[in-house]
Amino acid sequence: CFILNNMNSFDDRTRAVQKLIETLKSSNQISVVTEALRPGVIILIKDLNGNHVIQRCLQHLSNQDNQGVSLHLMQLMNLVKALFTLFP
């Protein structure tokens, strides 16, 4: 899972992870990759190249497999809404 660590801002690594996501077949493979990505979802979303990794997950994995990604996206949206409420 070294390639998945600190991959934001490393264009070649994000492309490799995108290709990896496209080739995942078994539920075990999907689980390993999504668990490795889960802690860095927010960082990936904010990075131009990392964003493509998240997009690839949403395109190629099932809704169930993307639950971790979706949960972090919802948390981020709730945080943004709260900030706009506090600081209009």
Image: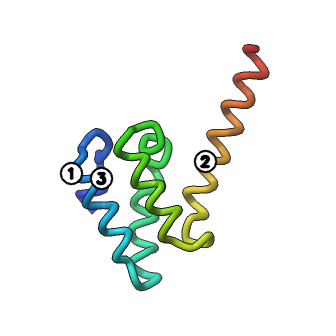
* Disc 1 and disc 3 in contact, CB within 8 angstroms: yes
Task: Say above or below: 78 vs 21.
Answer: above
For the point 37% across and 68% down, the residue is 21
User: Residue lying farthest bottom?
Assistant: 26
Q: Residues within 10 Å of mark 3 (few under 14, many from 20)?
A: many
For the point 25% across and 60% down, the residue is 16
- Where, quadrant-wise, is the C terminus in this rendering? top right
Q: Which residue in the protein does label 2 denote?
A: 73
Label of residue 14 in the image: 3
Residue 28 image position (x, y, % from top left): 42, 81
* Residue type highlighted by circle 1: Asp
Using the numbered discs, state the Cα–Cα distance from disc 2 to disc 1 in whole angstroms: 24 Å
User: Residue lying farthest front?
Assistant: 59
Q: Nearer the viewer, residue 32 or 88?
A: 88
Residue 87 image position (x, y, % from top left): 73, 14
Quadrant of residue 83 in the image? top right
User: Residue lying farthest right?
Assistant: 85
* Residue type highlighted by circle 2: Leu
For the point 47% across and 63% down, the residue is 57
For the point 24% across and 46% down, the residue is 11
* Residue type highlighted by circle 3: Thr
For the residues carrying marks 2 and 1, which lies nearer the camera in this image? 1
For the residues carrying marks 3 and 2, which lies nearer the camera in this image? 3
Mark positioned earlier in the residue sequence (3 or 2):
3
Residue 52 image position (x, y, % from top left): 40, 51
Q: Which residue in the protein does label 1 denote?
A: 12
